[in-house]
Amino acid sequence: MSFSQIYTNINNQSRDGENDWETVPQRQPLSGQSLNNGGGYSYTVSPIESLKRFLILGCEGGTYYVAQDALTLQNARLVEKLVVEMNMGFEVVSTAVEYNVNNKAPKNEPSLFVLALCARLGSPETKKAPFESIAKVCRIPTHLFTFVCYCQEINPQGKGWGRAMRRAISLWYLNQPVDKLAFLMTKYNQRGGFSHRDLLRLCHACPKVDGQNILFAYAVQKTFKDFQSLYNIDNEIAALVESQELETIQMLKFIKAVEEMKTLNDVDNWEHVHRAIALIQEFNLVREHINTNLLVSKAVWEQLLEKMPLTAILRNLGKMTSINLLEPLSHAANLVVQRLTDEKRLHQSRIHPIAILIAFKTYMMGHGIKGSLQWTPKVNIVSALDKAFYLSFVHVQPTKKRFLLAMDVSGSMCSAVSGAPMISCYEASAALAMCTAKTETYHHFVAFSDTLENISINASMSLSKVVANMKRIRMGFTDCSLPITYALNYKIPVDVFMVFTDNETYYGEIHPSQALCKYRREMNLPNTKLIVMGMASNEFTIADPEDKGMLDMAGFDASAPDVIRSFVLQD
């Protein structure tokens, strides 16, 4: 993606009327500004940049100023404006697909929501494009169920299952190898009120081969007994041996193993546990296939862990700790630490940084958000999660520039990160700032609200220590100009101001963009730049879109380090 698409900067000229250096309070607008949710005035990012923020930050949980439902509606109207009024349907679809496929966003739901909207809006070409991308963006059935659910919710009274929808869903099933499809269908049974039985009946998928015909029958029948009345697995396997249909034979054996696993429900019966372990070994069954009664067995979890993907490890750290599987120096603990700190495995597994941050914060809490499960965090696992967070970002060479890392700790930043109720925006901003601090040698941390203070954070600190230090800082009103005026007052030479904020500034006597112009002039540093890391899915920014030395980004873009480096080194 070119940088002209990433940031909205055009030229380095000040706006008309702003070069007389008369300061304007943030409760009064500069040219081109709009009233923000905090009562001050900020610039408005372009609609396509707002879309990118939504794709990365989502709107689950809302923000300090805007409730979740209102924020969802606001972003839905944004997509409608882009597609219908601005005729940018193709760009909206391609952007949503890019952010989904390239793992730029923590979650897939926002991109699937955007694609579902596009499937119901705009020109015939725009409506067709999301369905053509289904195979790319719906990598597992959960994504497919979510997309279908959004389509139904967006147009509940409409036809819903038109020809394009039926064809796209059918192809998703028909283009999968039957052994892989059997695994996916048994691991991810249903979501949002839809099951495989529902989708197959609605899309009218026509099997191409016998294996698909058998598998679809297995999914559509209400019970395994009903399926057995149509297909006796042992007889089918015997018949297929002669025709050498090995893929179908393996699929049938797999289904038989899954159904047998459902009957193994006595954790005190060693035969049940031993048989479950044997089935896991032979058929690579995963946690979702296991009878819940056996999920308190260390032996079962030890076997599951051998081939457990990283995403599953992150989800199950609490459970494995609660049953004493991850005791220090144990084989299981060593295996988890090794995998969490394997940089190549992290990137191959498409683990997004925020997924690790959520796992880290949840594990540190010692209990989940829901349910009664509790555990005592293990130091070695905490350390591995800390390291994994930084490893999950794209690594770049240092720019050797001087960075002032400024974190907004005003009241609005105490709201939770979208989809992560255990993490506040200011805690997340500190974690993100640490990524820059670990890359750049020359950096300094400050925190601001209506006052500014230096904070005792350094690049060698653990993530838990950073979060603990941030919690001690007093919150107040929002003045995003403070980091710049602070550097000017104390004559601190800065090449890059990096501000982590929700952009709802209103309290200061000078706008941040004006403060930067003044800093450049009085410090004789004309190339000093401002990077704004947006921590909320709104349309506001303190970065002047007509100043090429200011960059606006969504906070949890996994490619941020590479974009930042290119921007900082650009003349």
Image (spheres, rainbow, N blue to C red):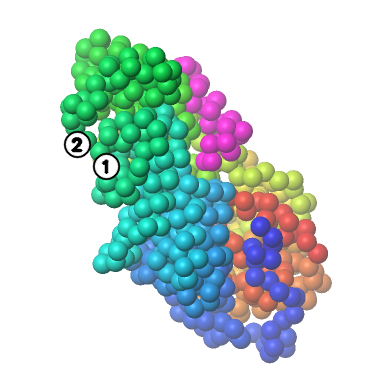
Q: Which residue is mark 1?
A: 197
Which residue matches tag 2?
222
Amino acid found under the numbered disc labelled 2: Lys
Tell me the CA gap for discs 2 and 1. Answer: 8 Å
Label 1 packing within 10 angstroms: few (<14), some (14-19), many (20+): some
SS category of the residue bearing label 1: helix
Q: Which residues are magenta?
A: 327-351
* Circle 2 crowding by C-alpha within 10 Å: few under 14, some 14–19, many from 20: few
The first of marks 2 and 1 along the sequence is 1
Which residue is at 50% across, 53% downward?
Answer: 133
The residue that appears at 58% across and 41% down in the rendered structure is 392
Q: Residue at x 57, y 73 (%)?
A: 46
Left of 231 or right of it: where is 450? Answer: right
The one nearer the camera, 358 or 539, is 539
Q: Is residue 53 above or below residue 326?
A: below
Name the quarter where the C terminus is drawn.
Answer: bottom right
Q: Quadrant of residue 405?
A: bottom right
Q: Is residue 71 visible?
A: no
- Report the amino acid beneath label 1: Arg
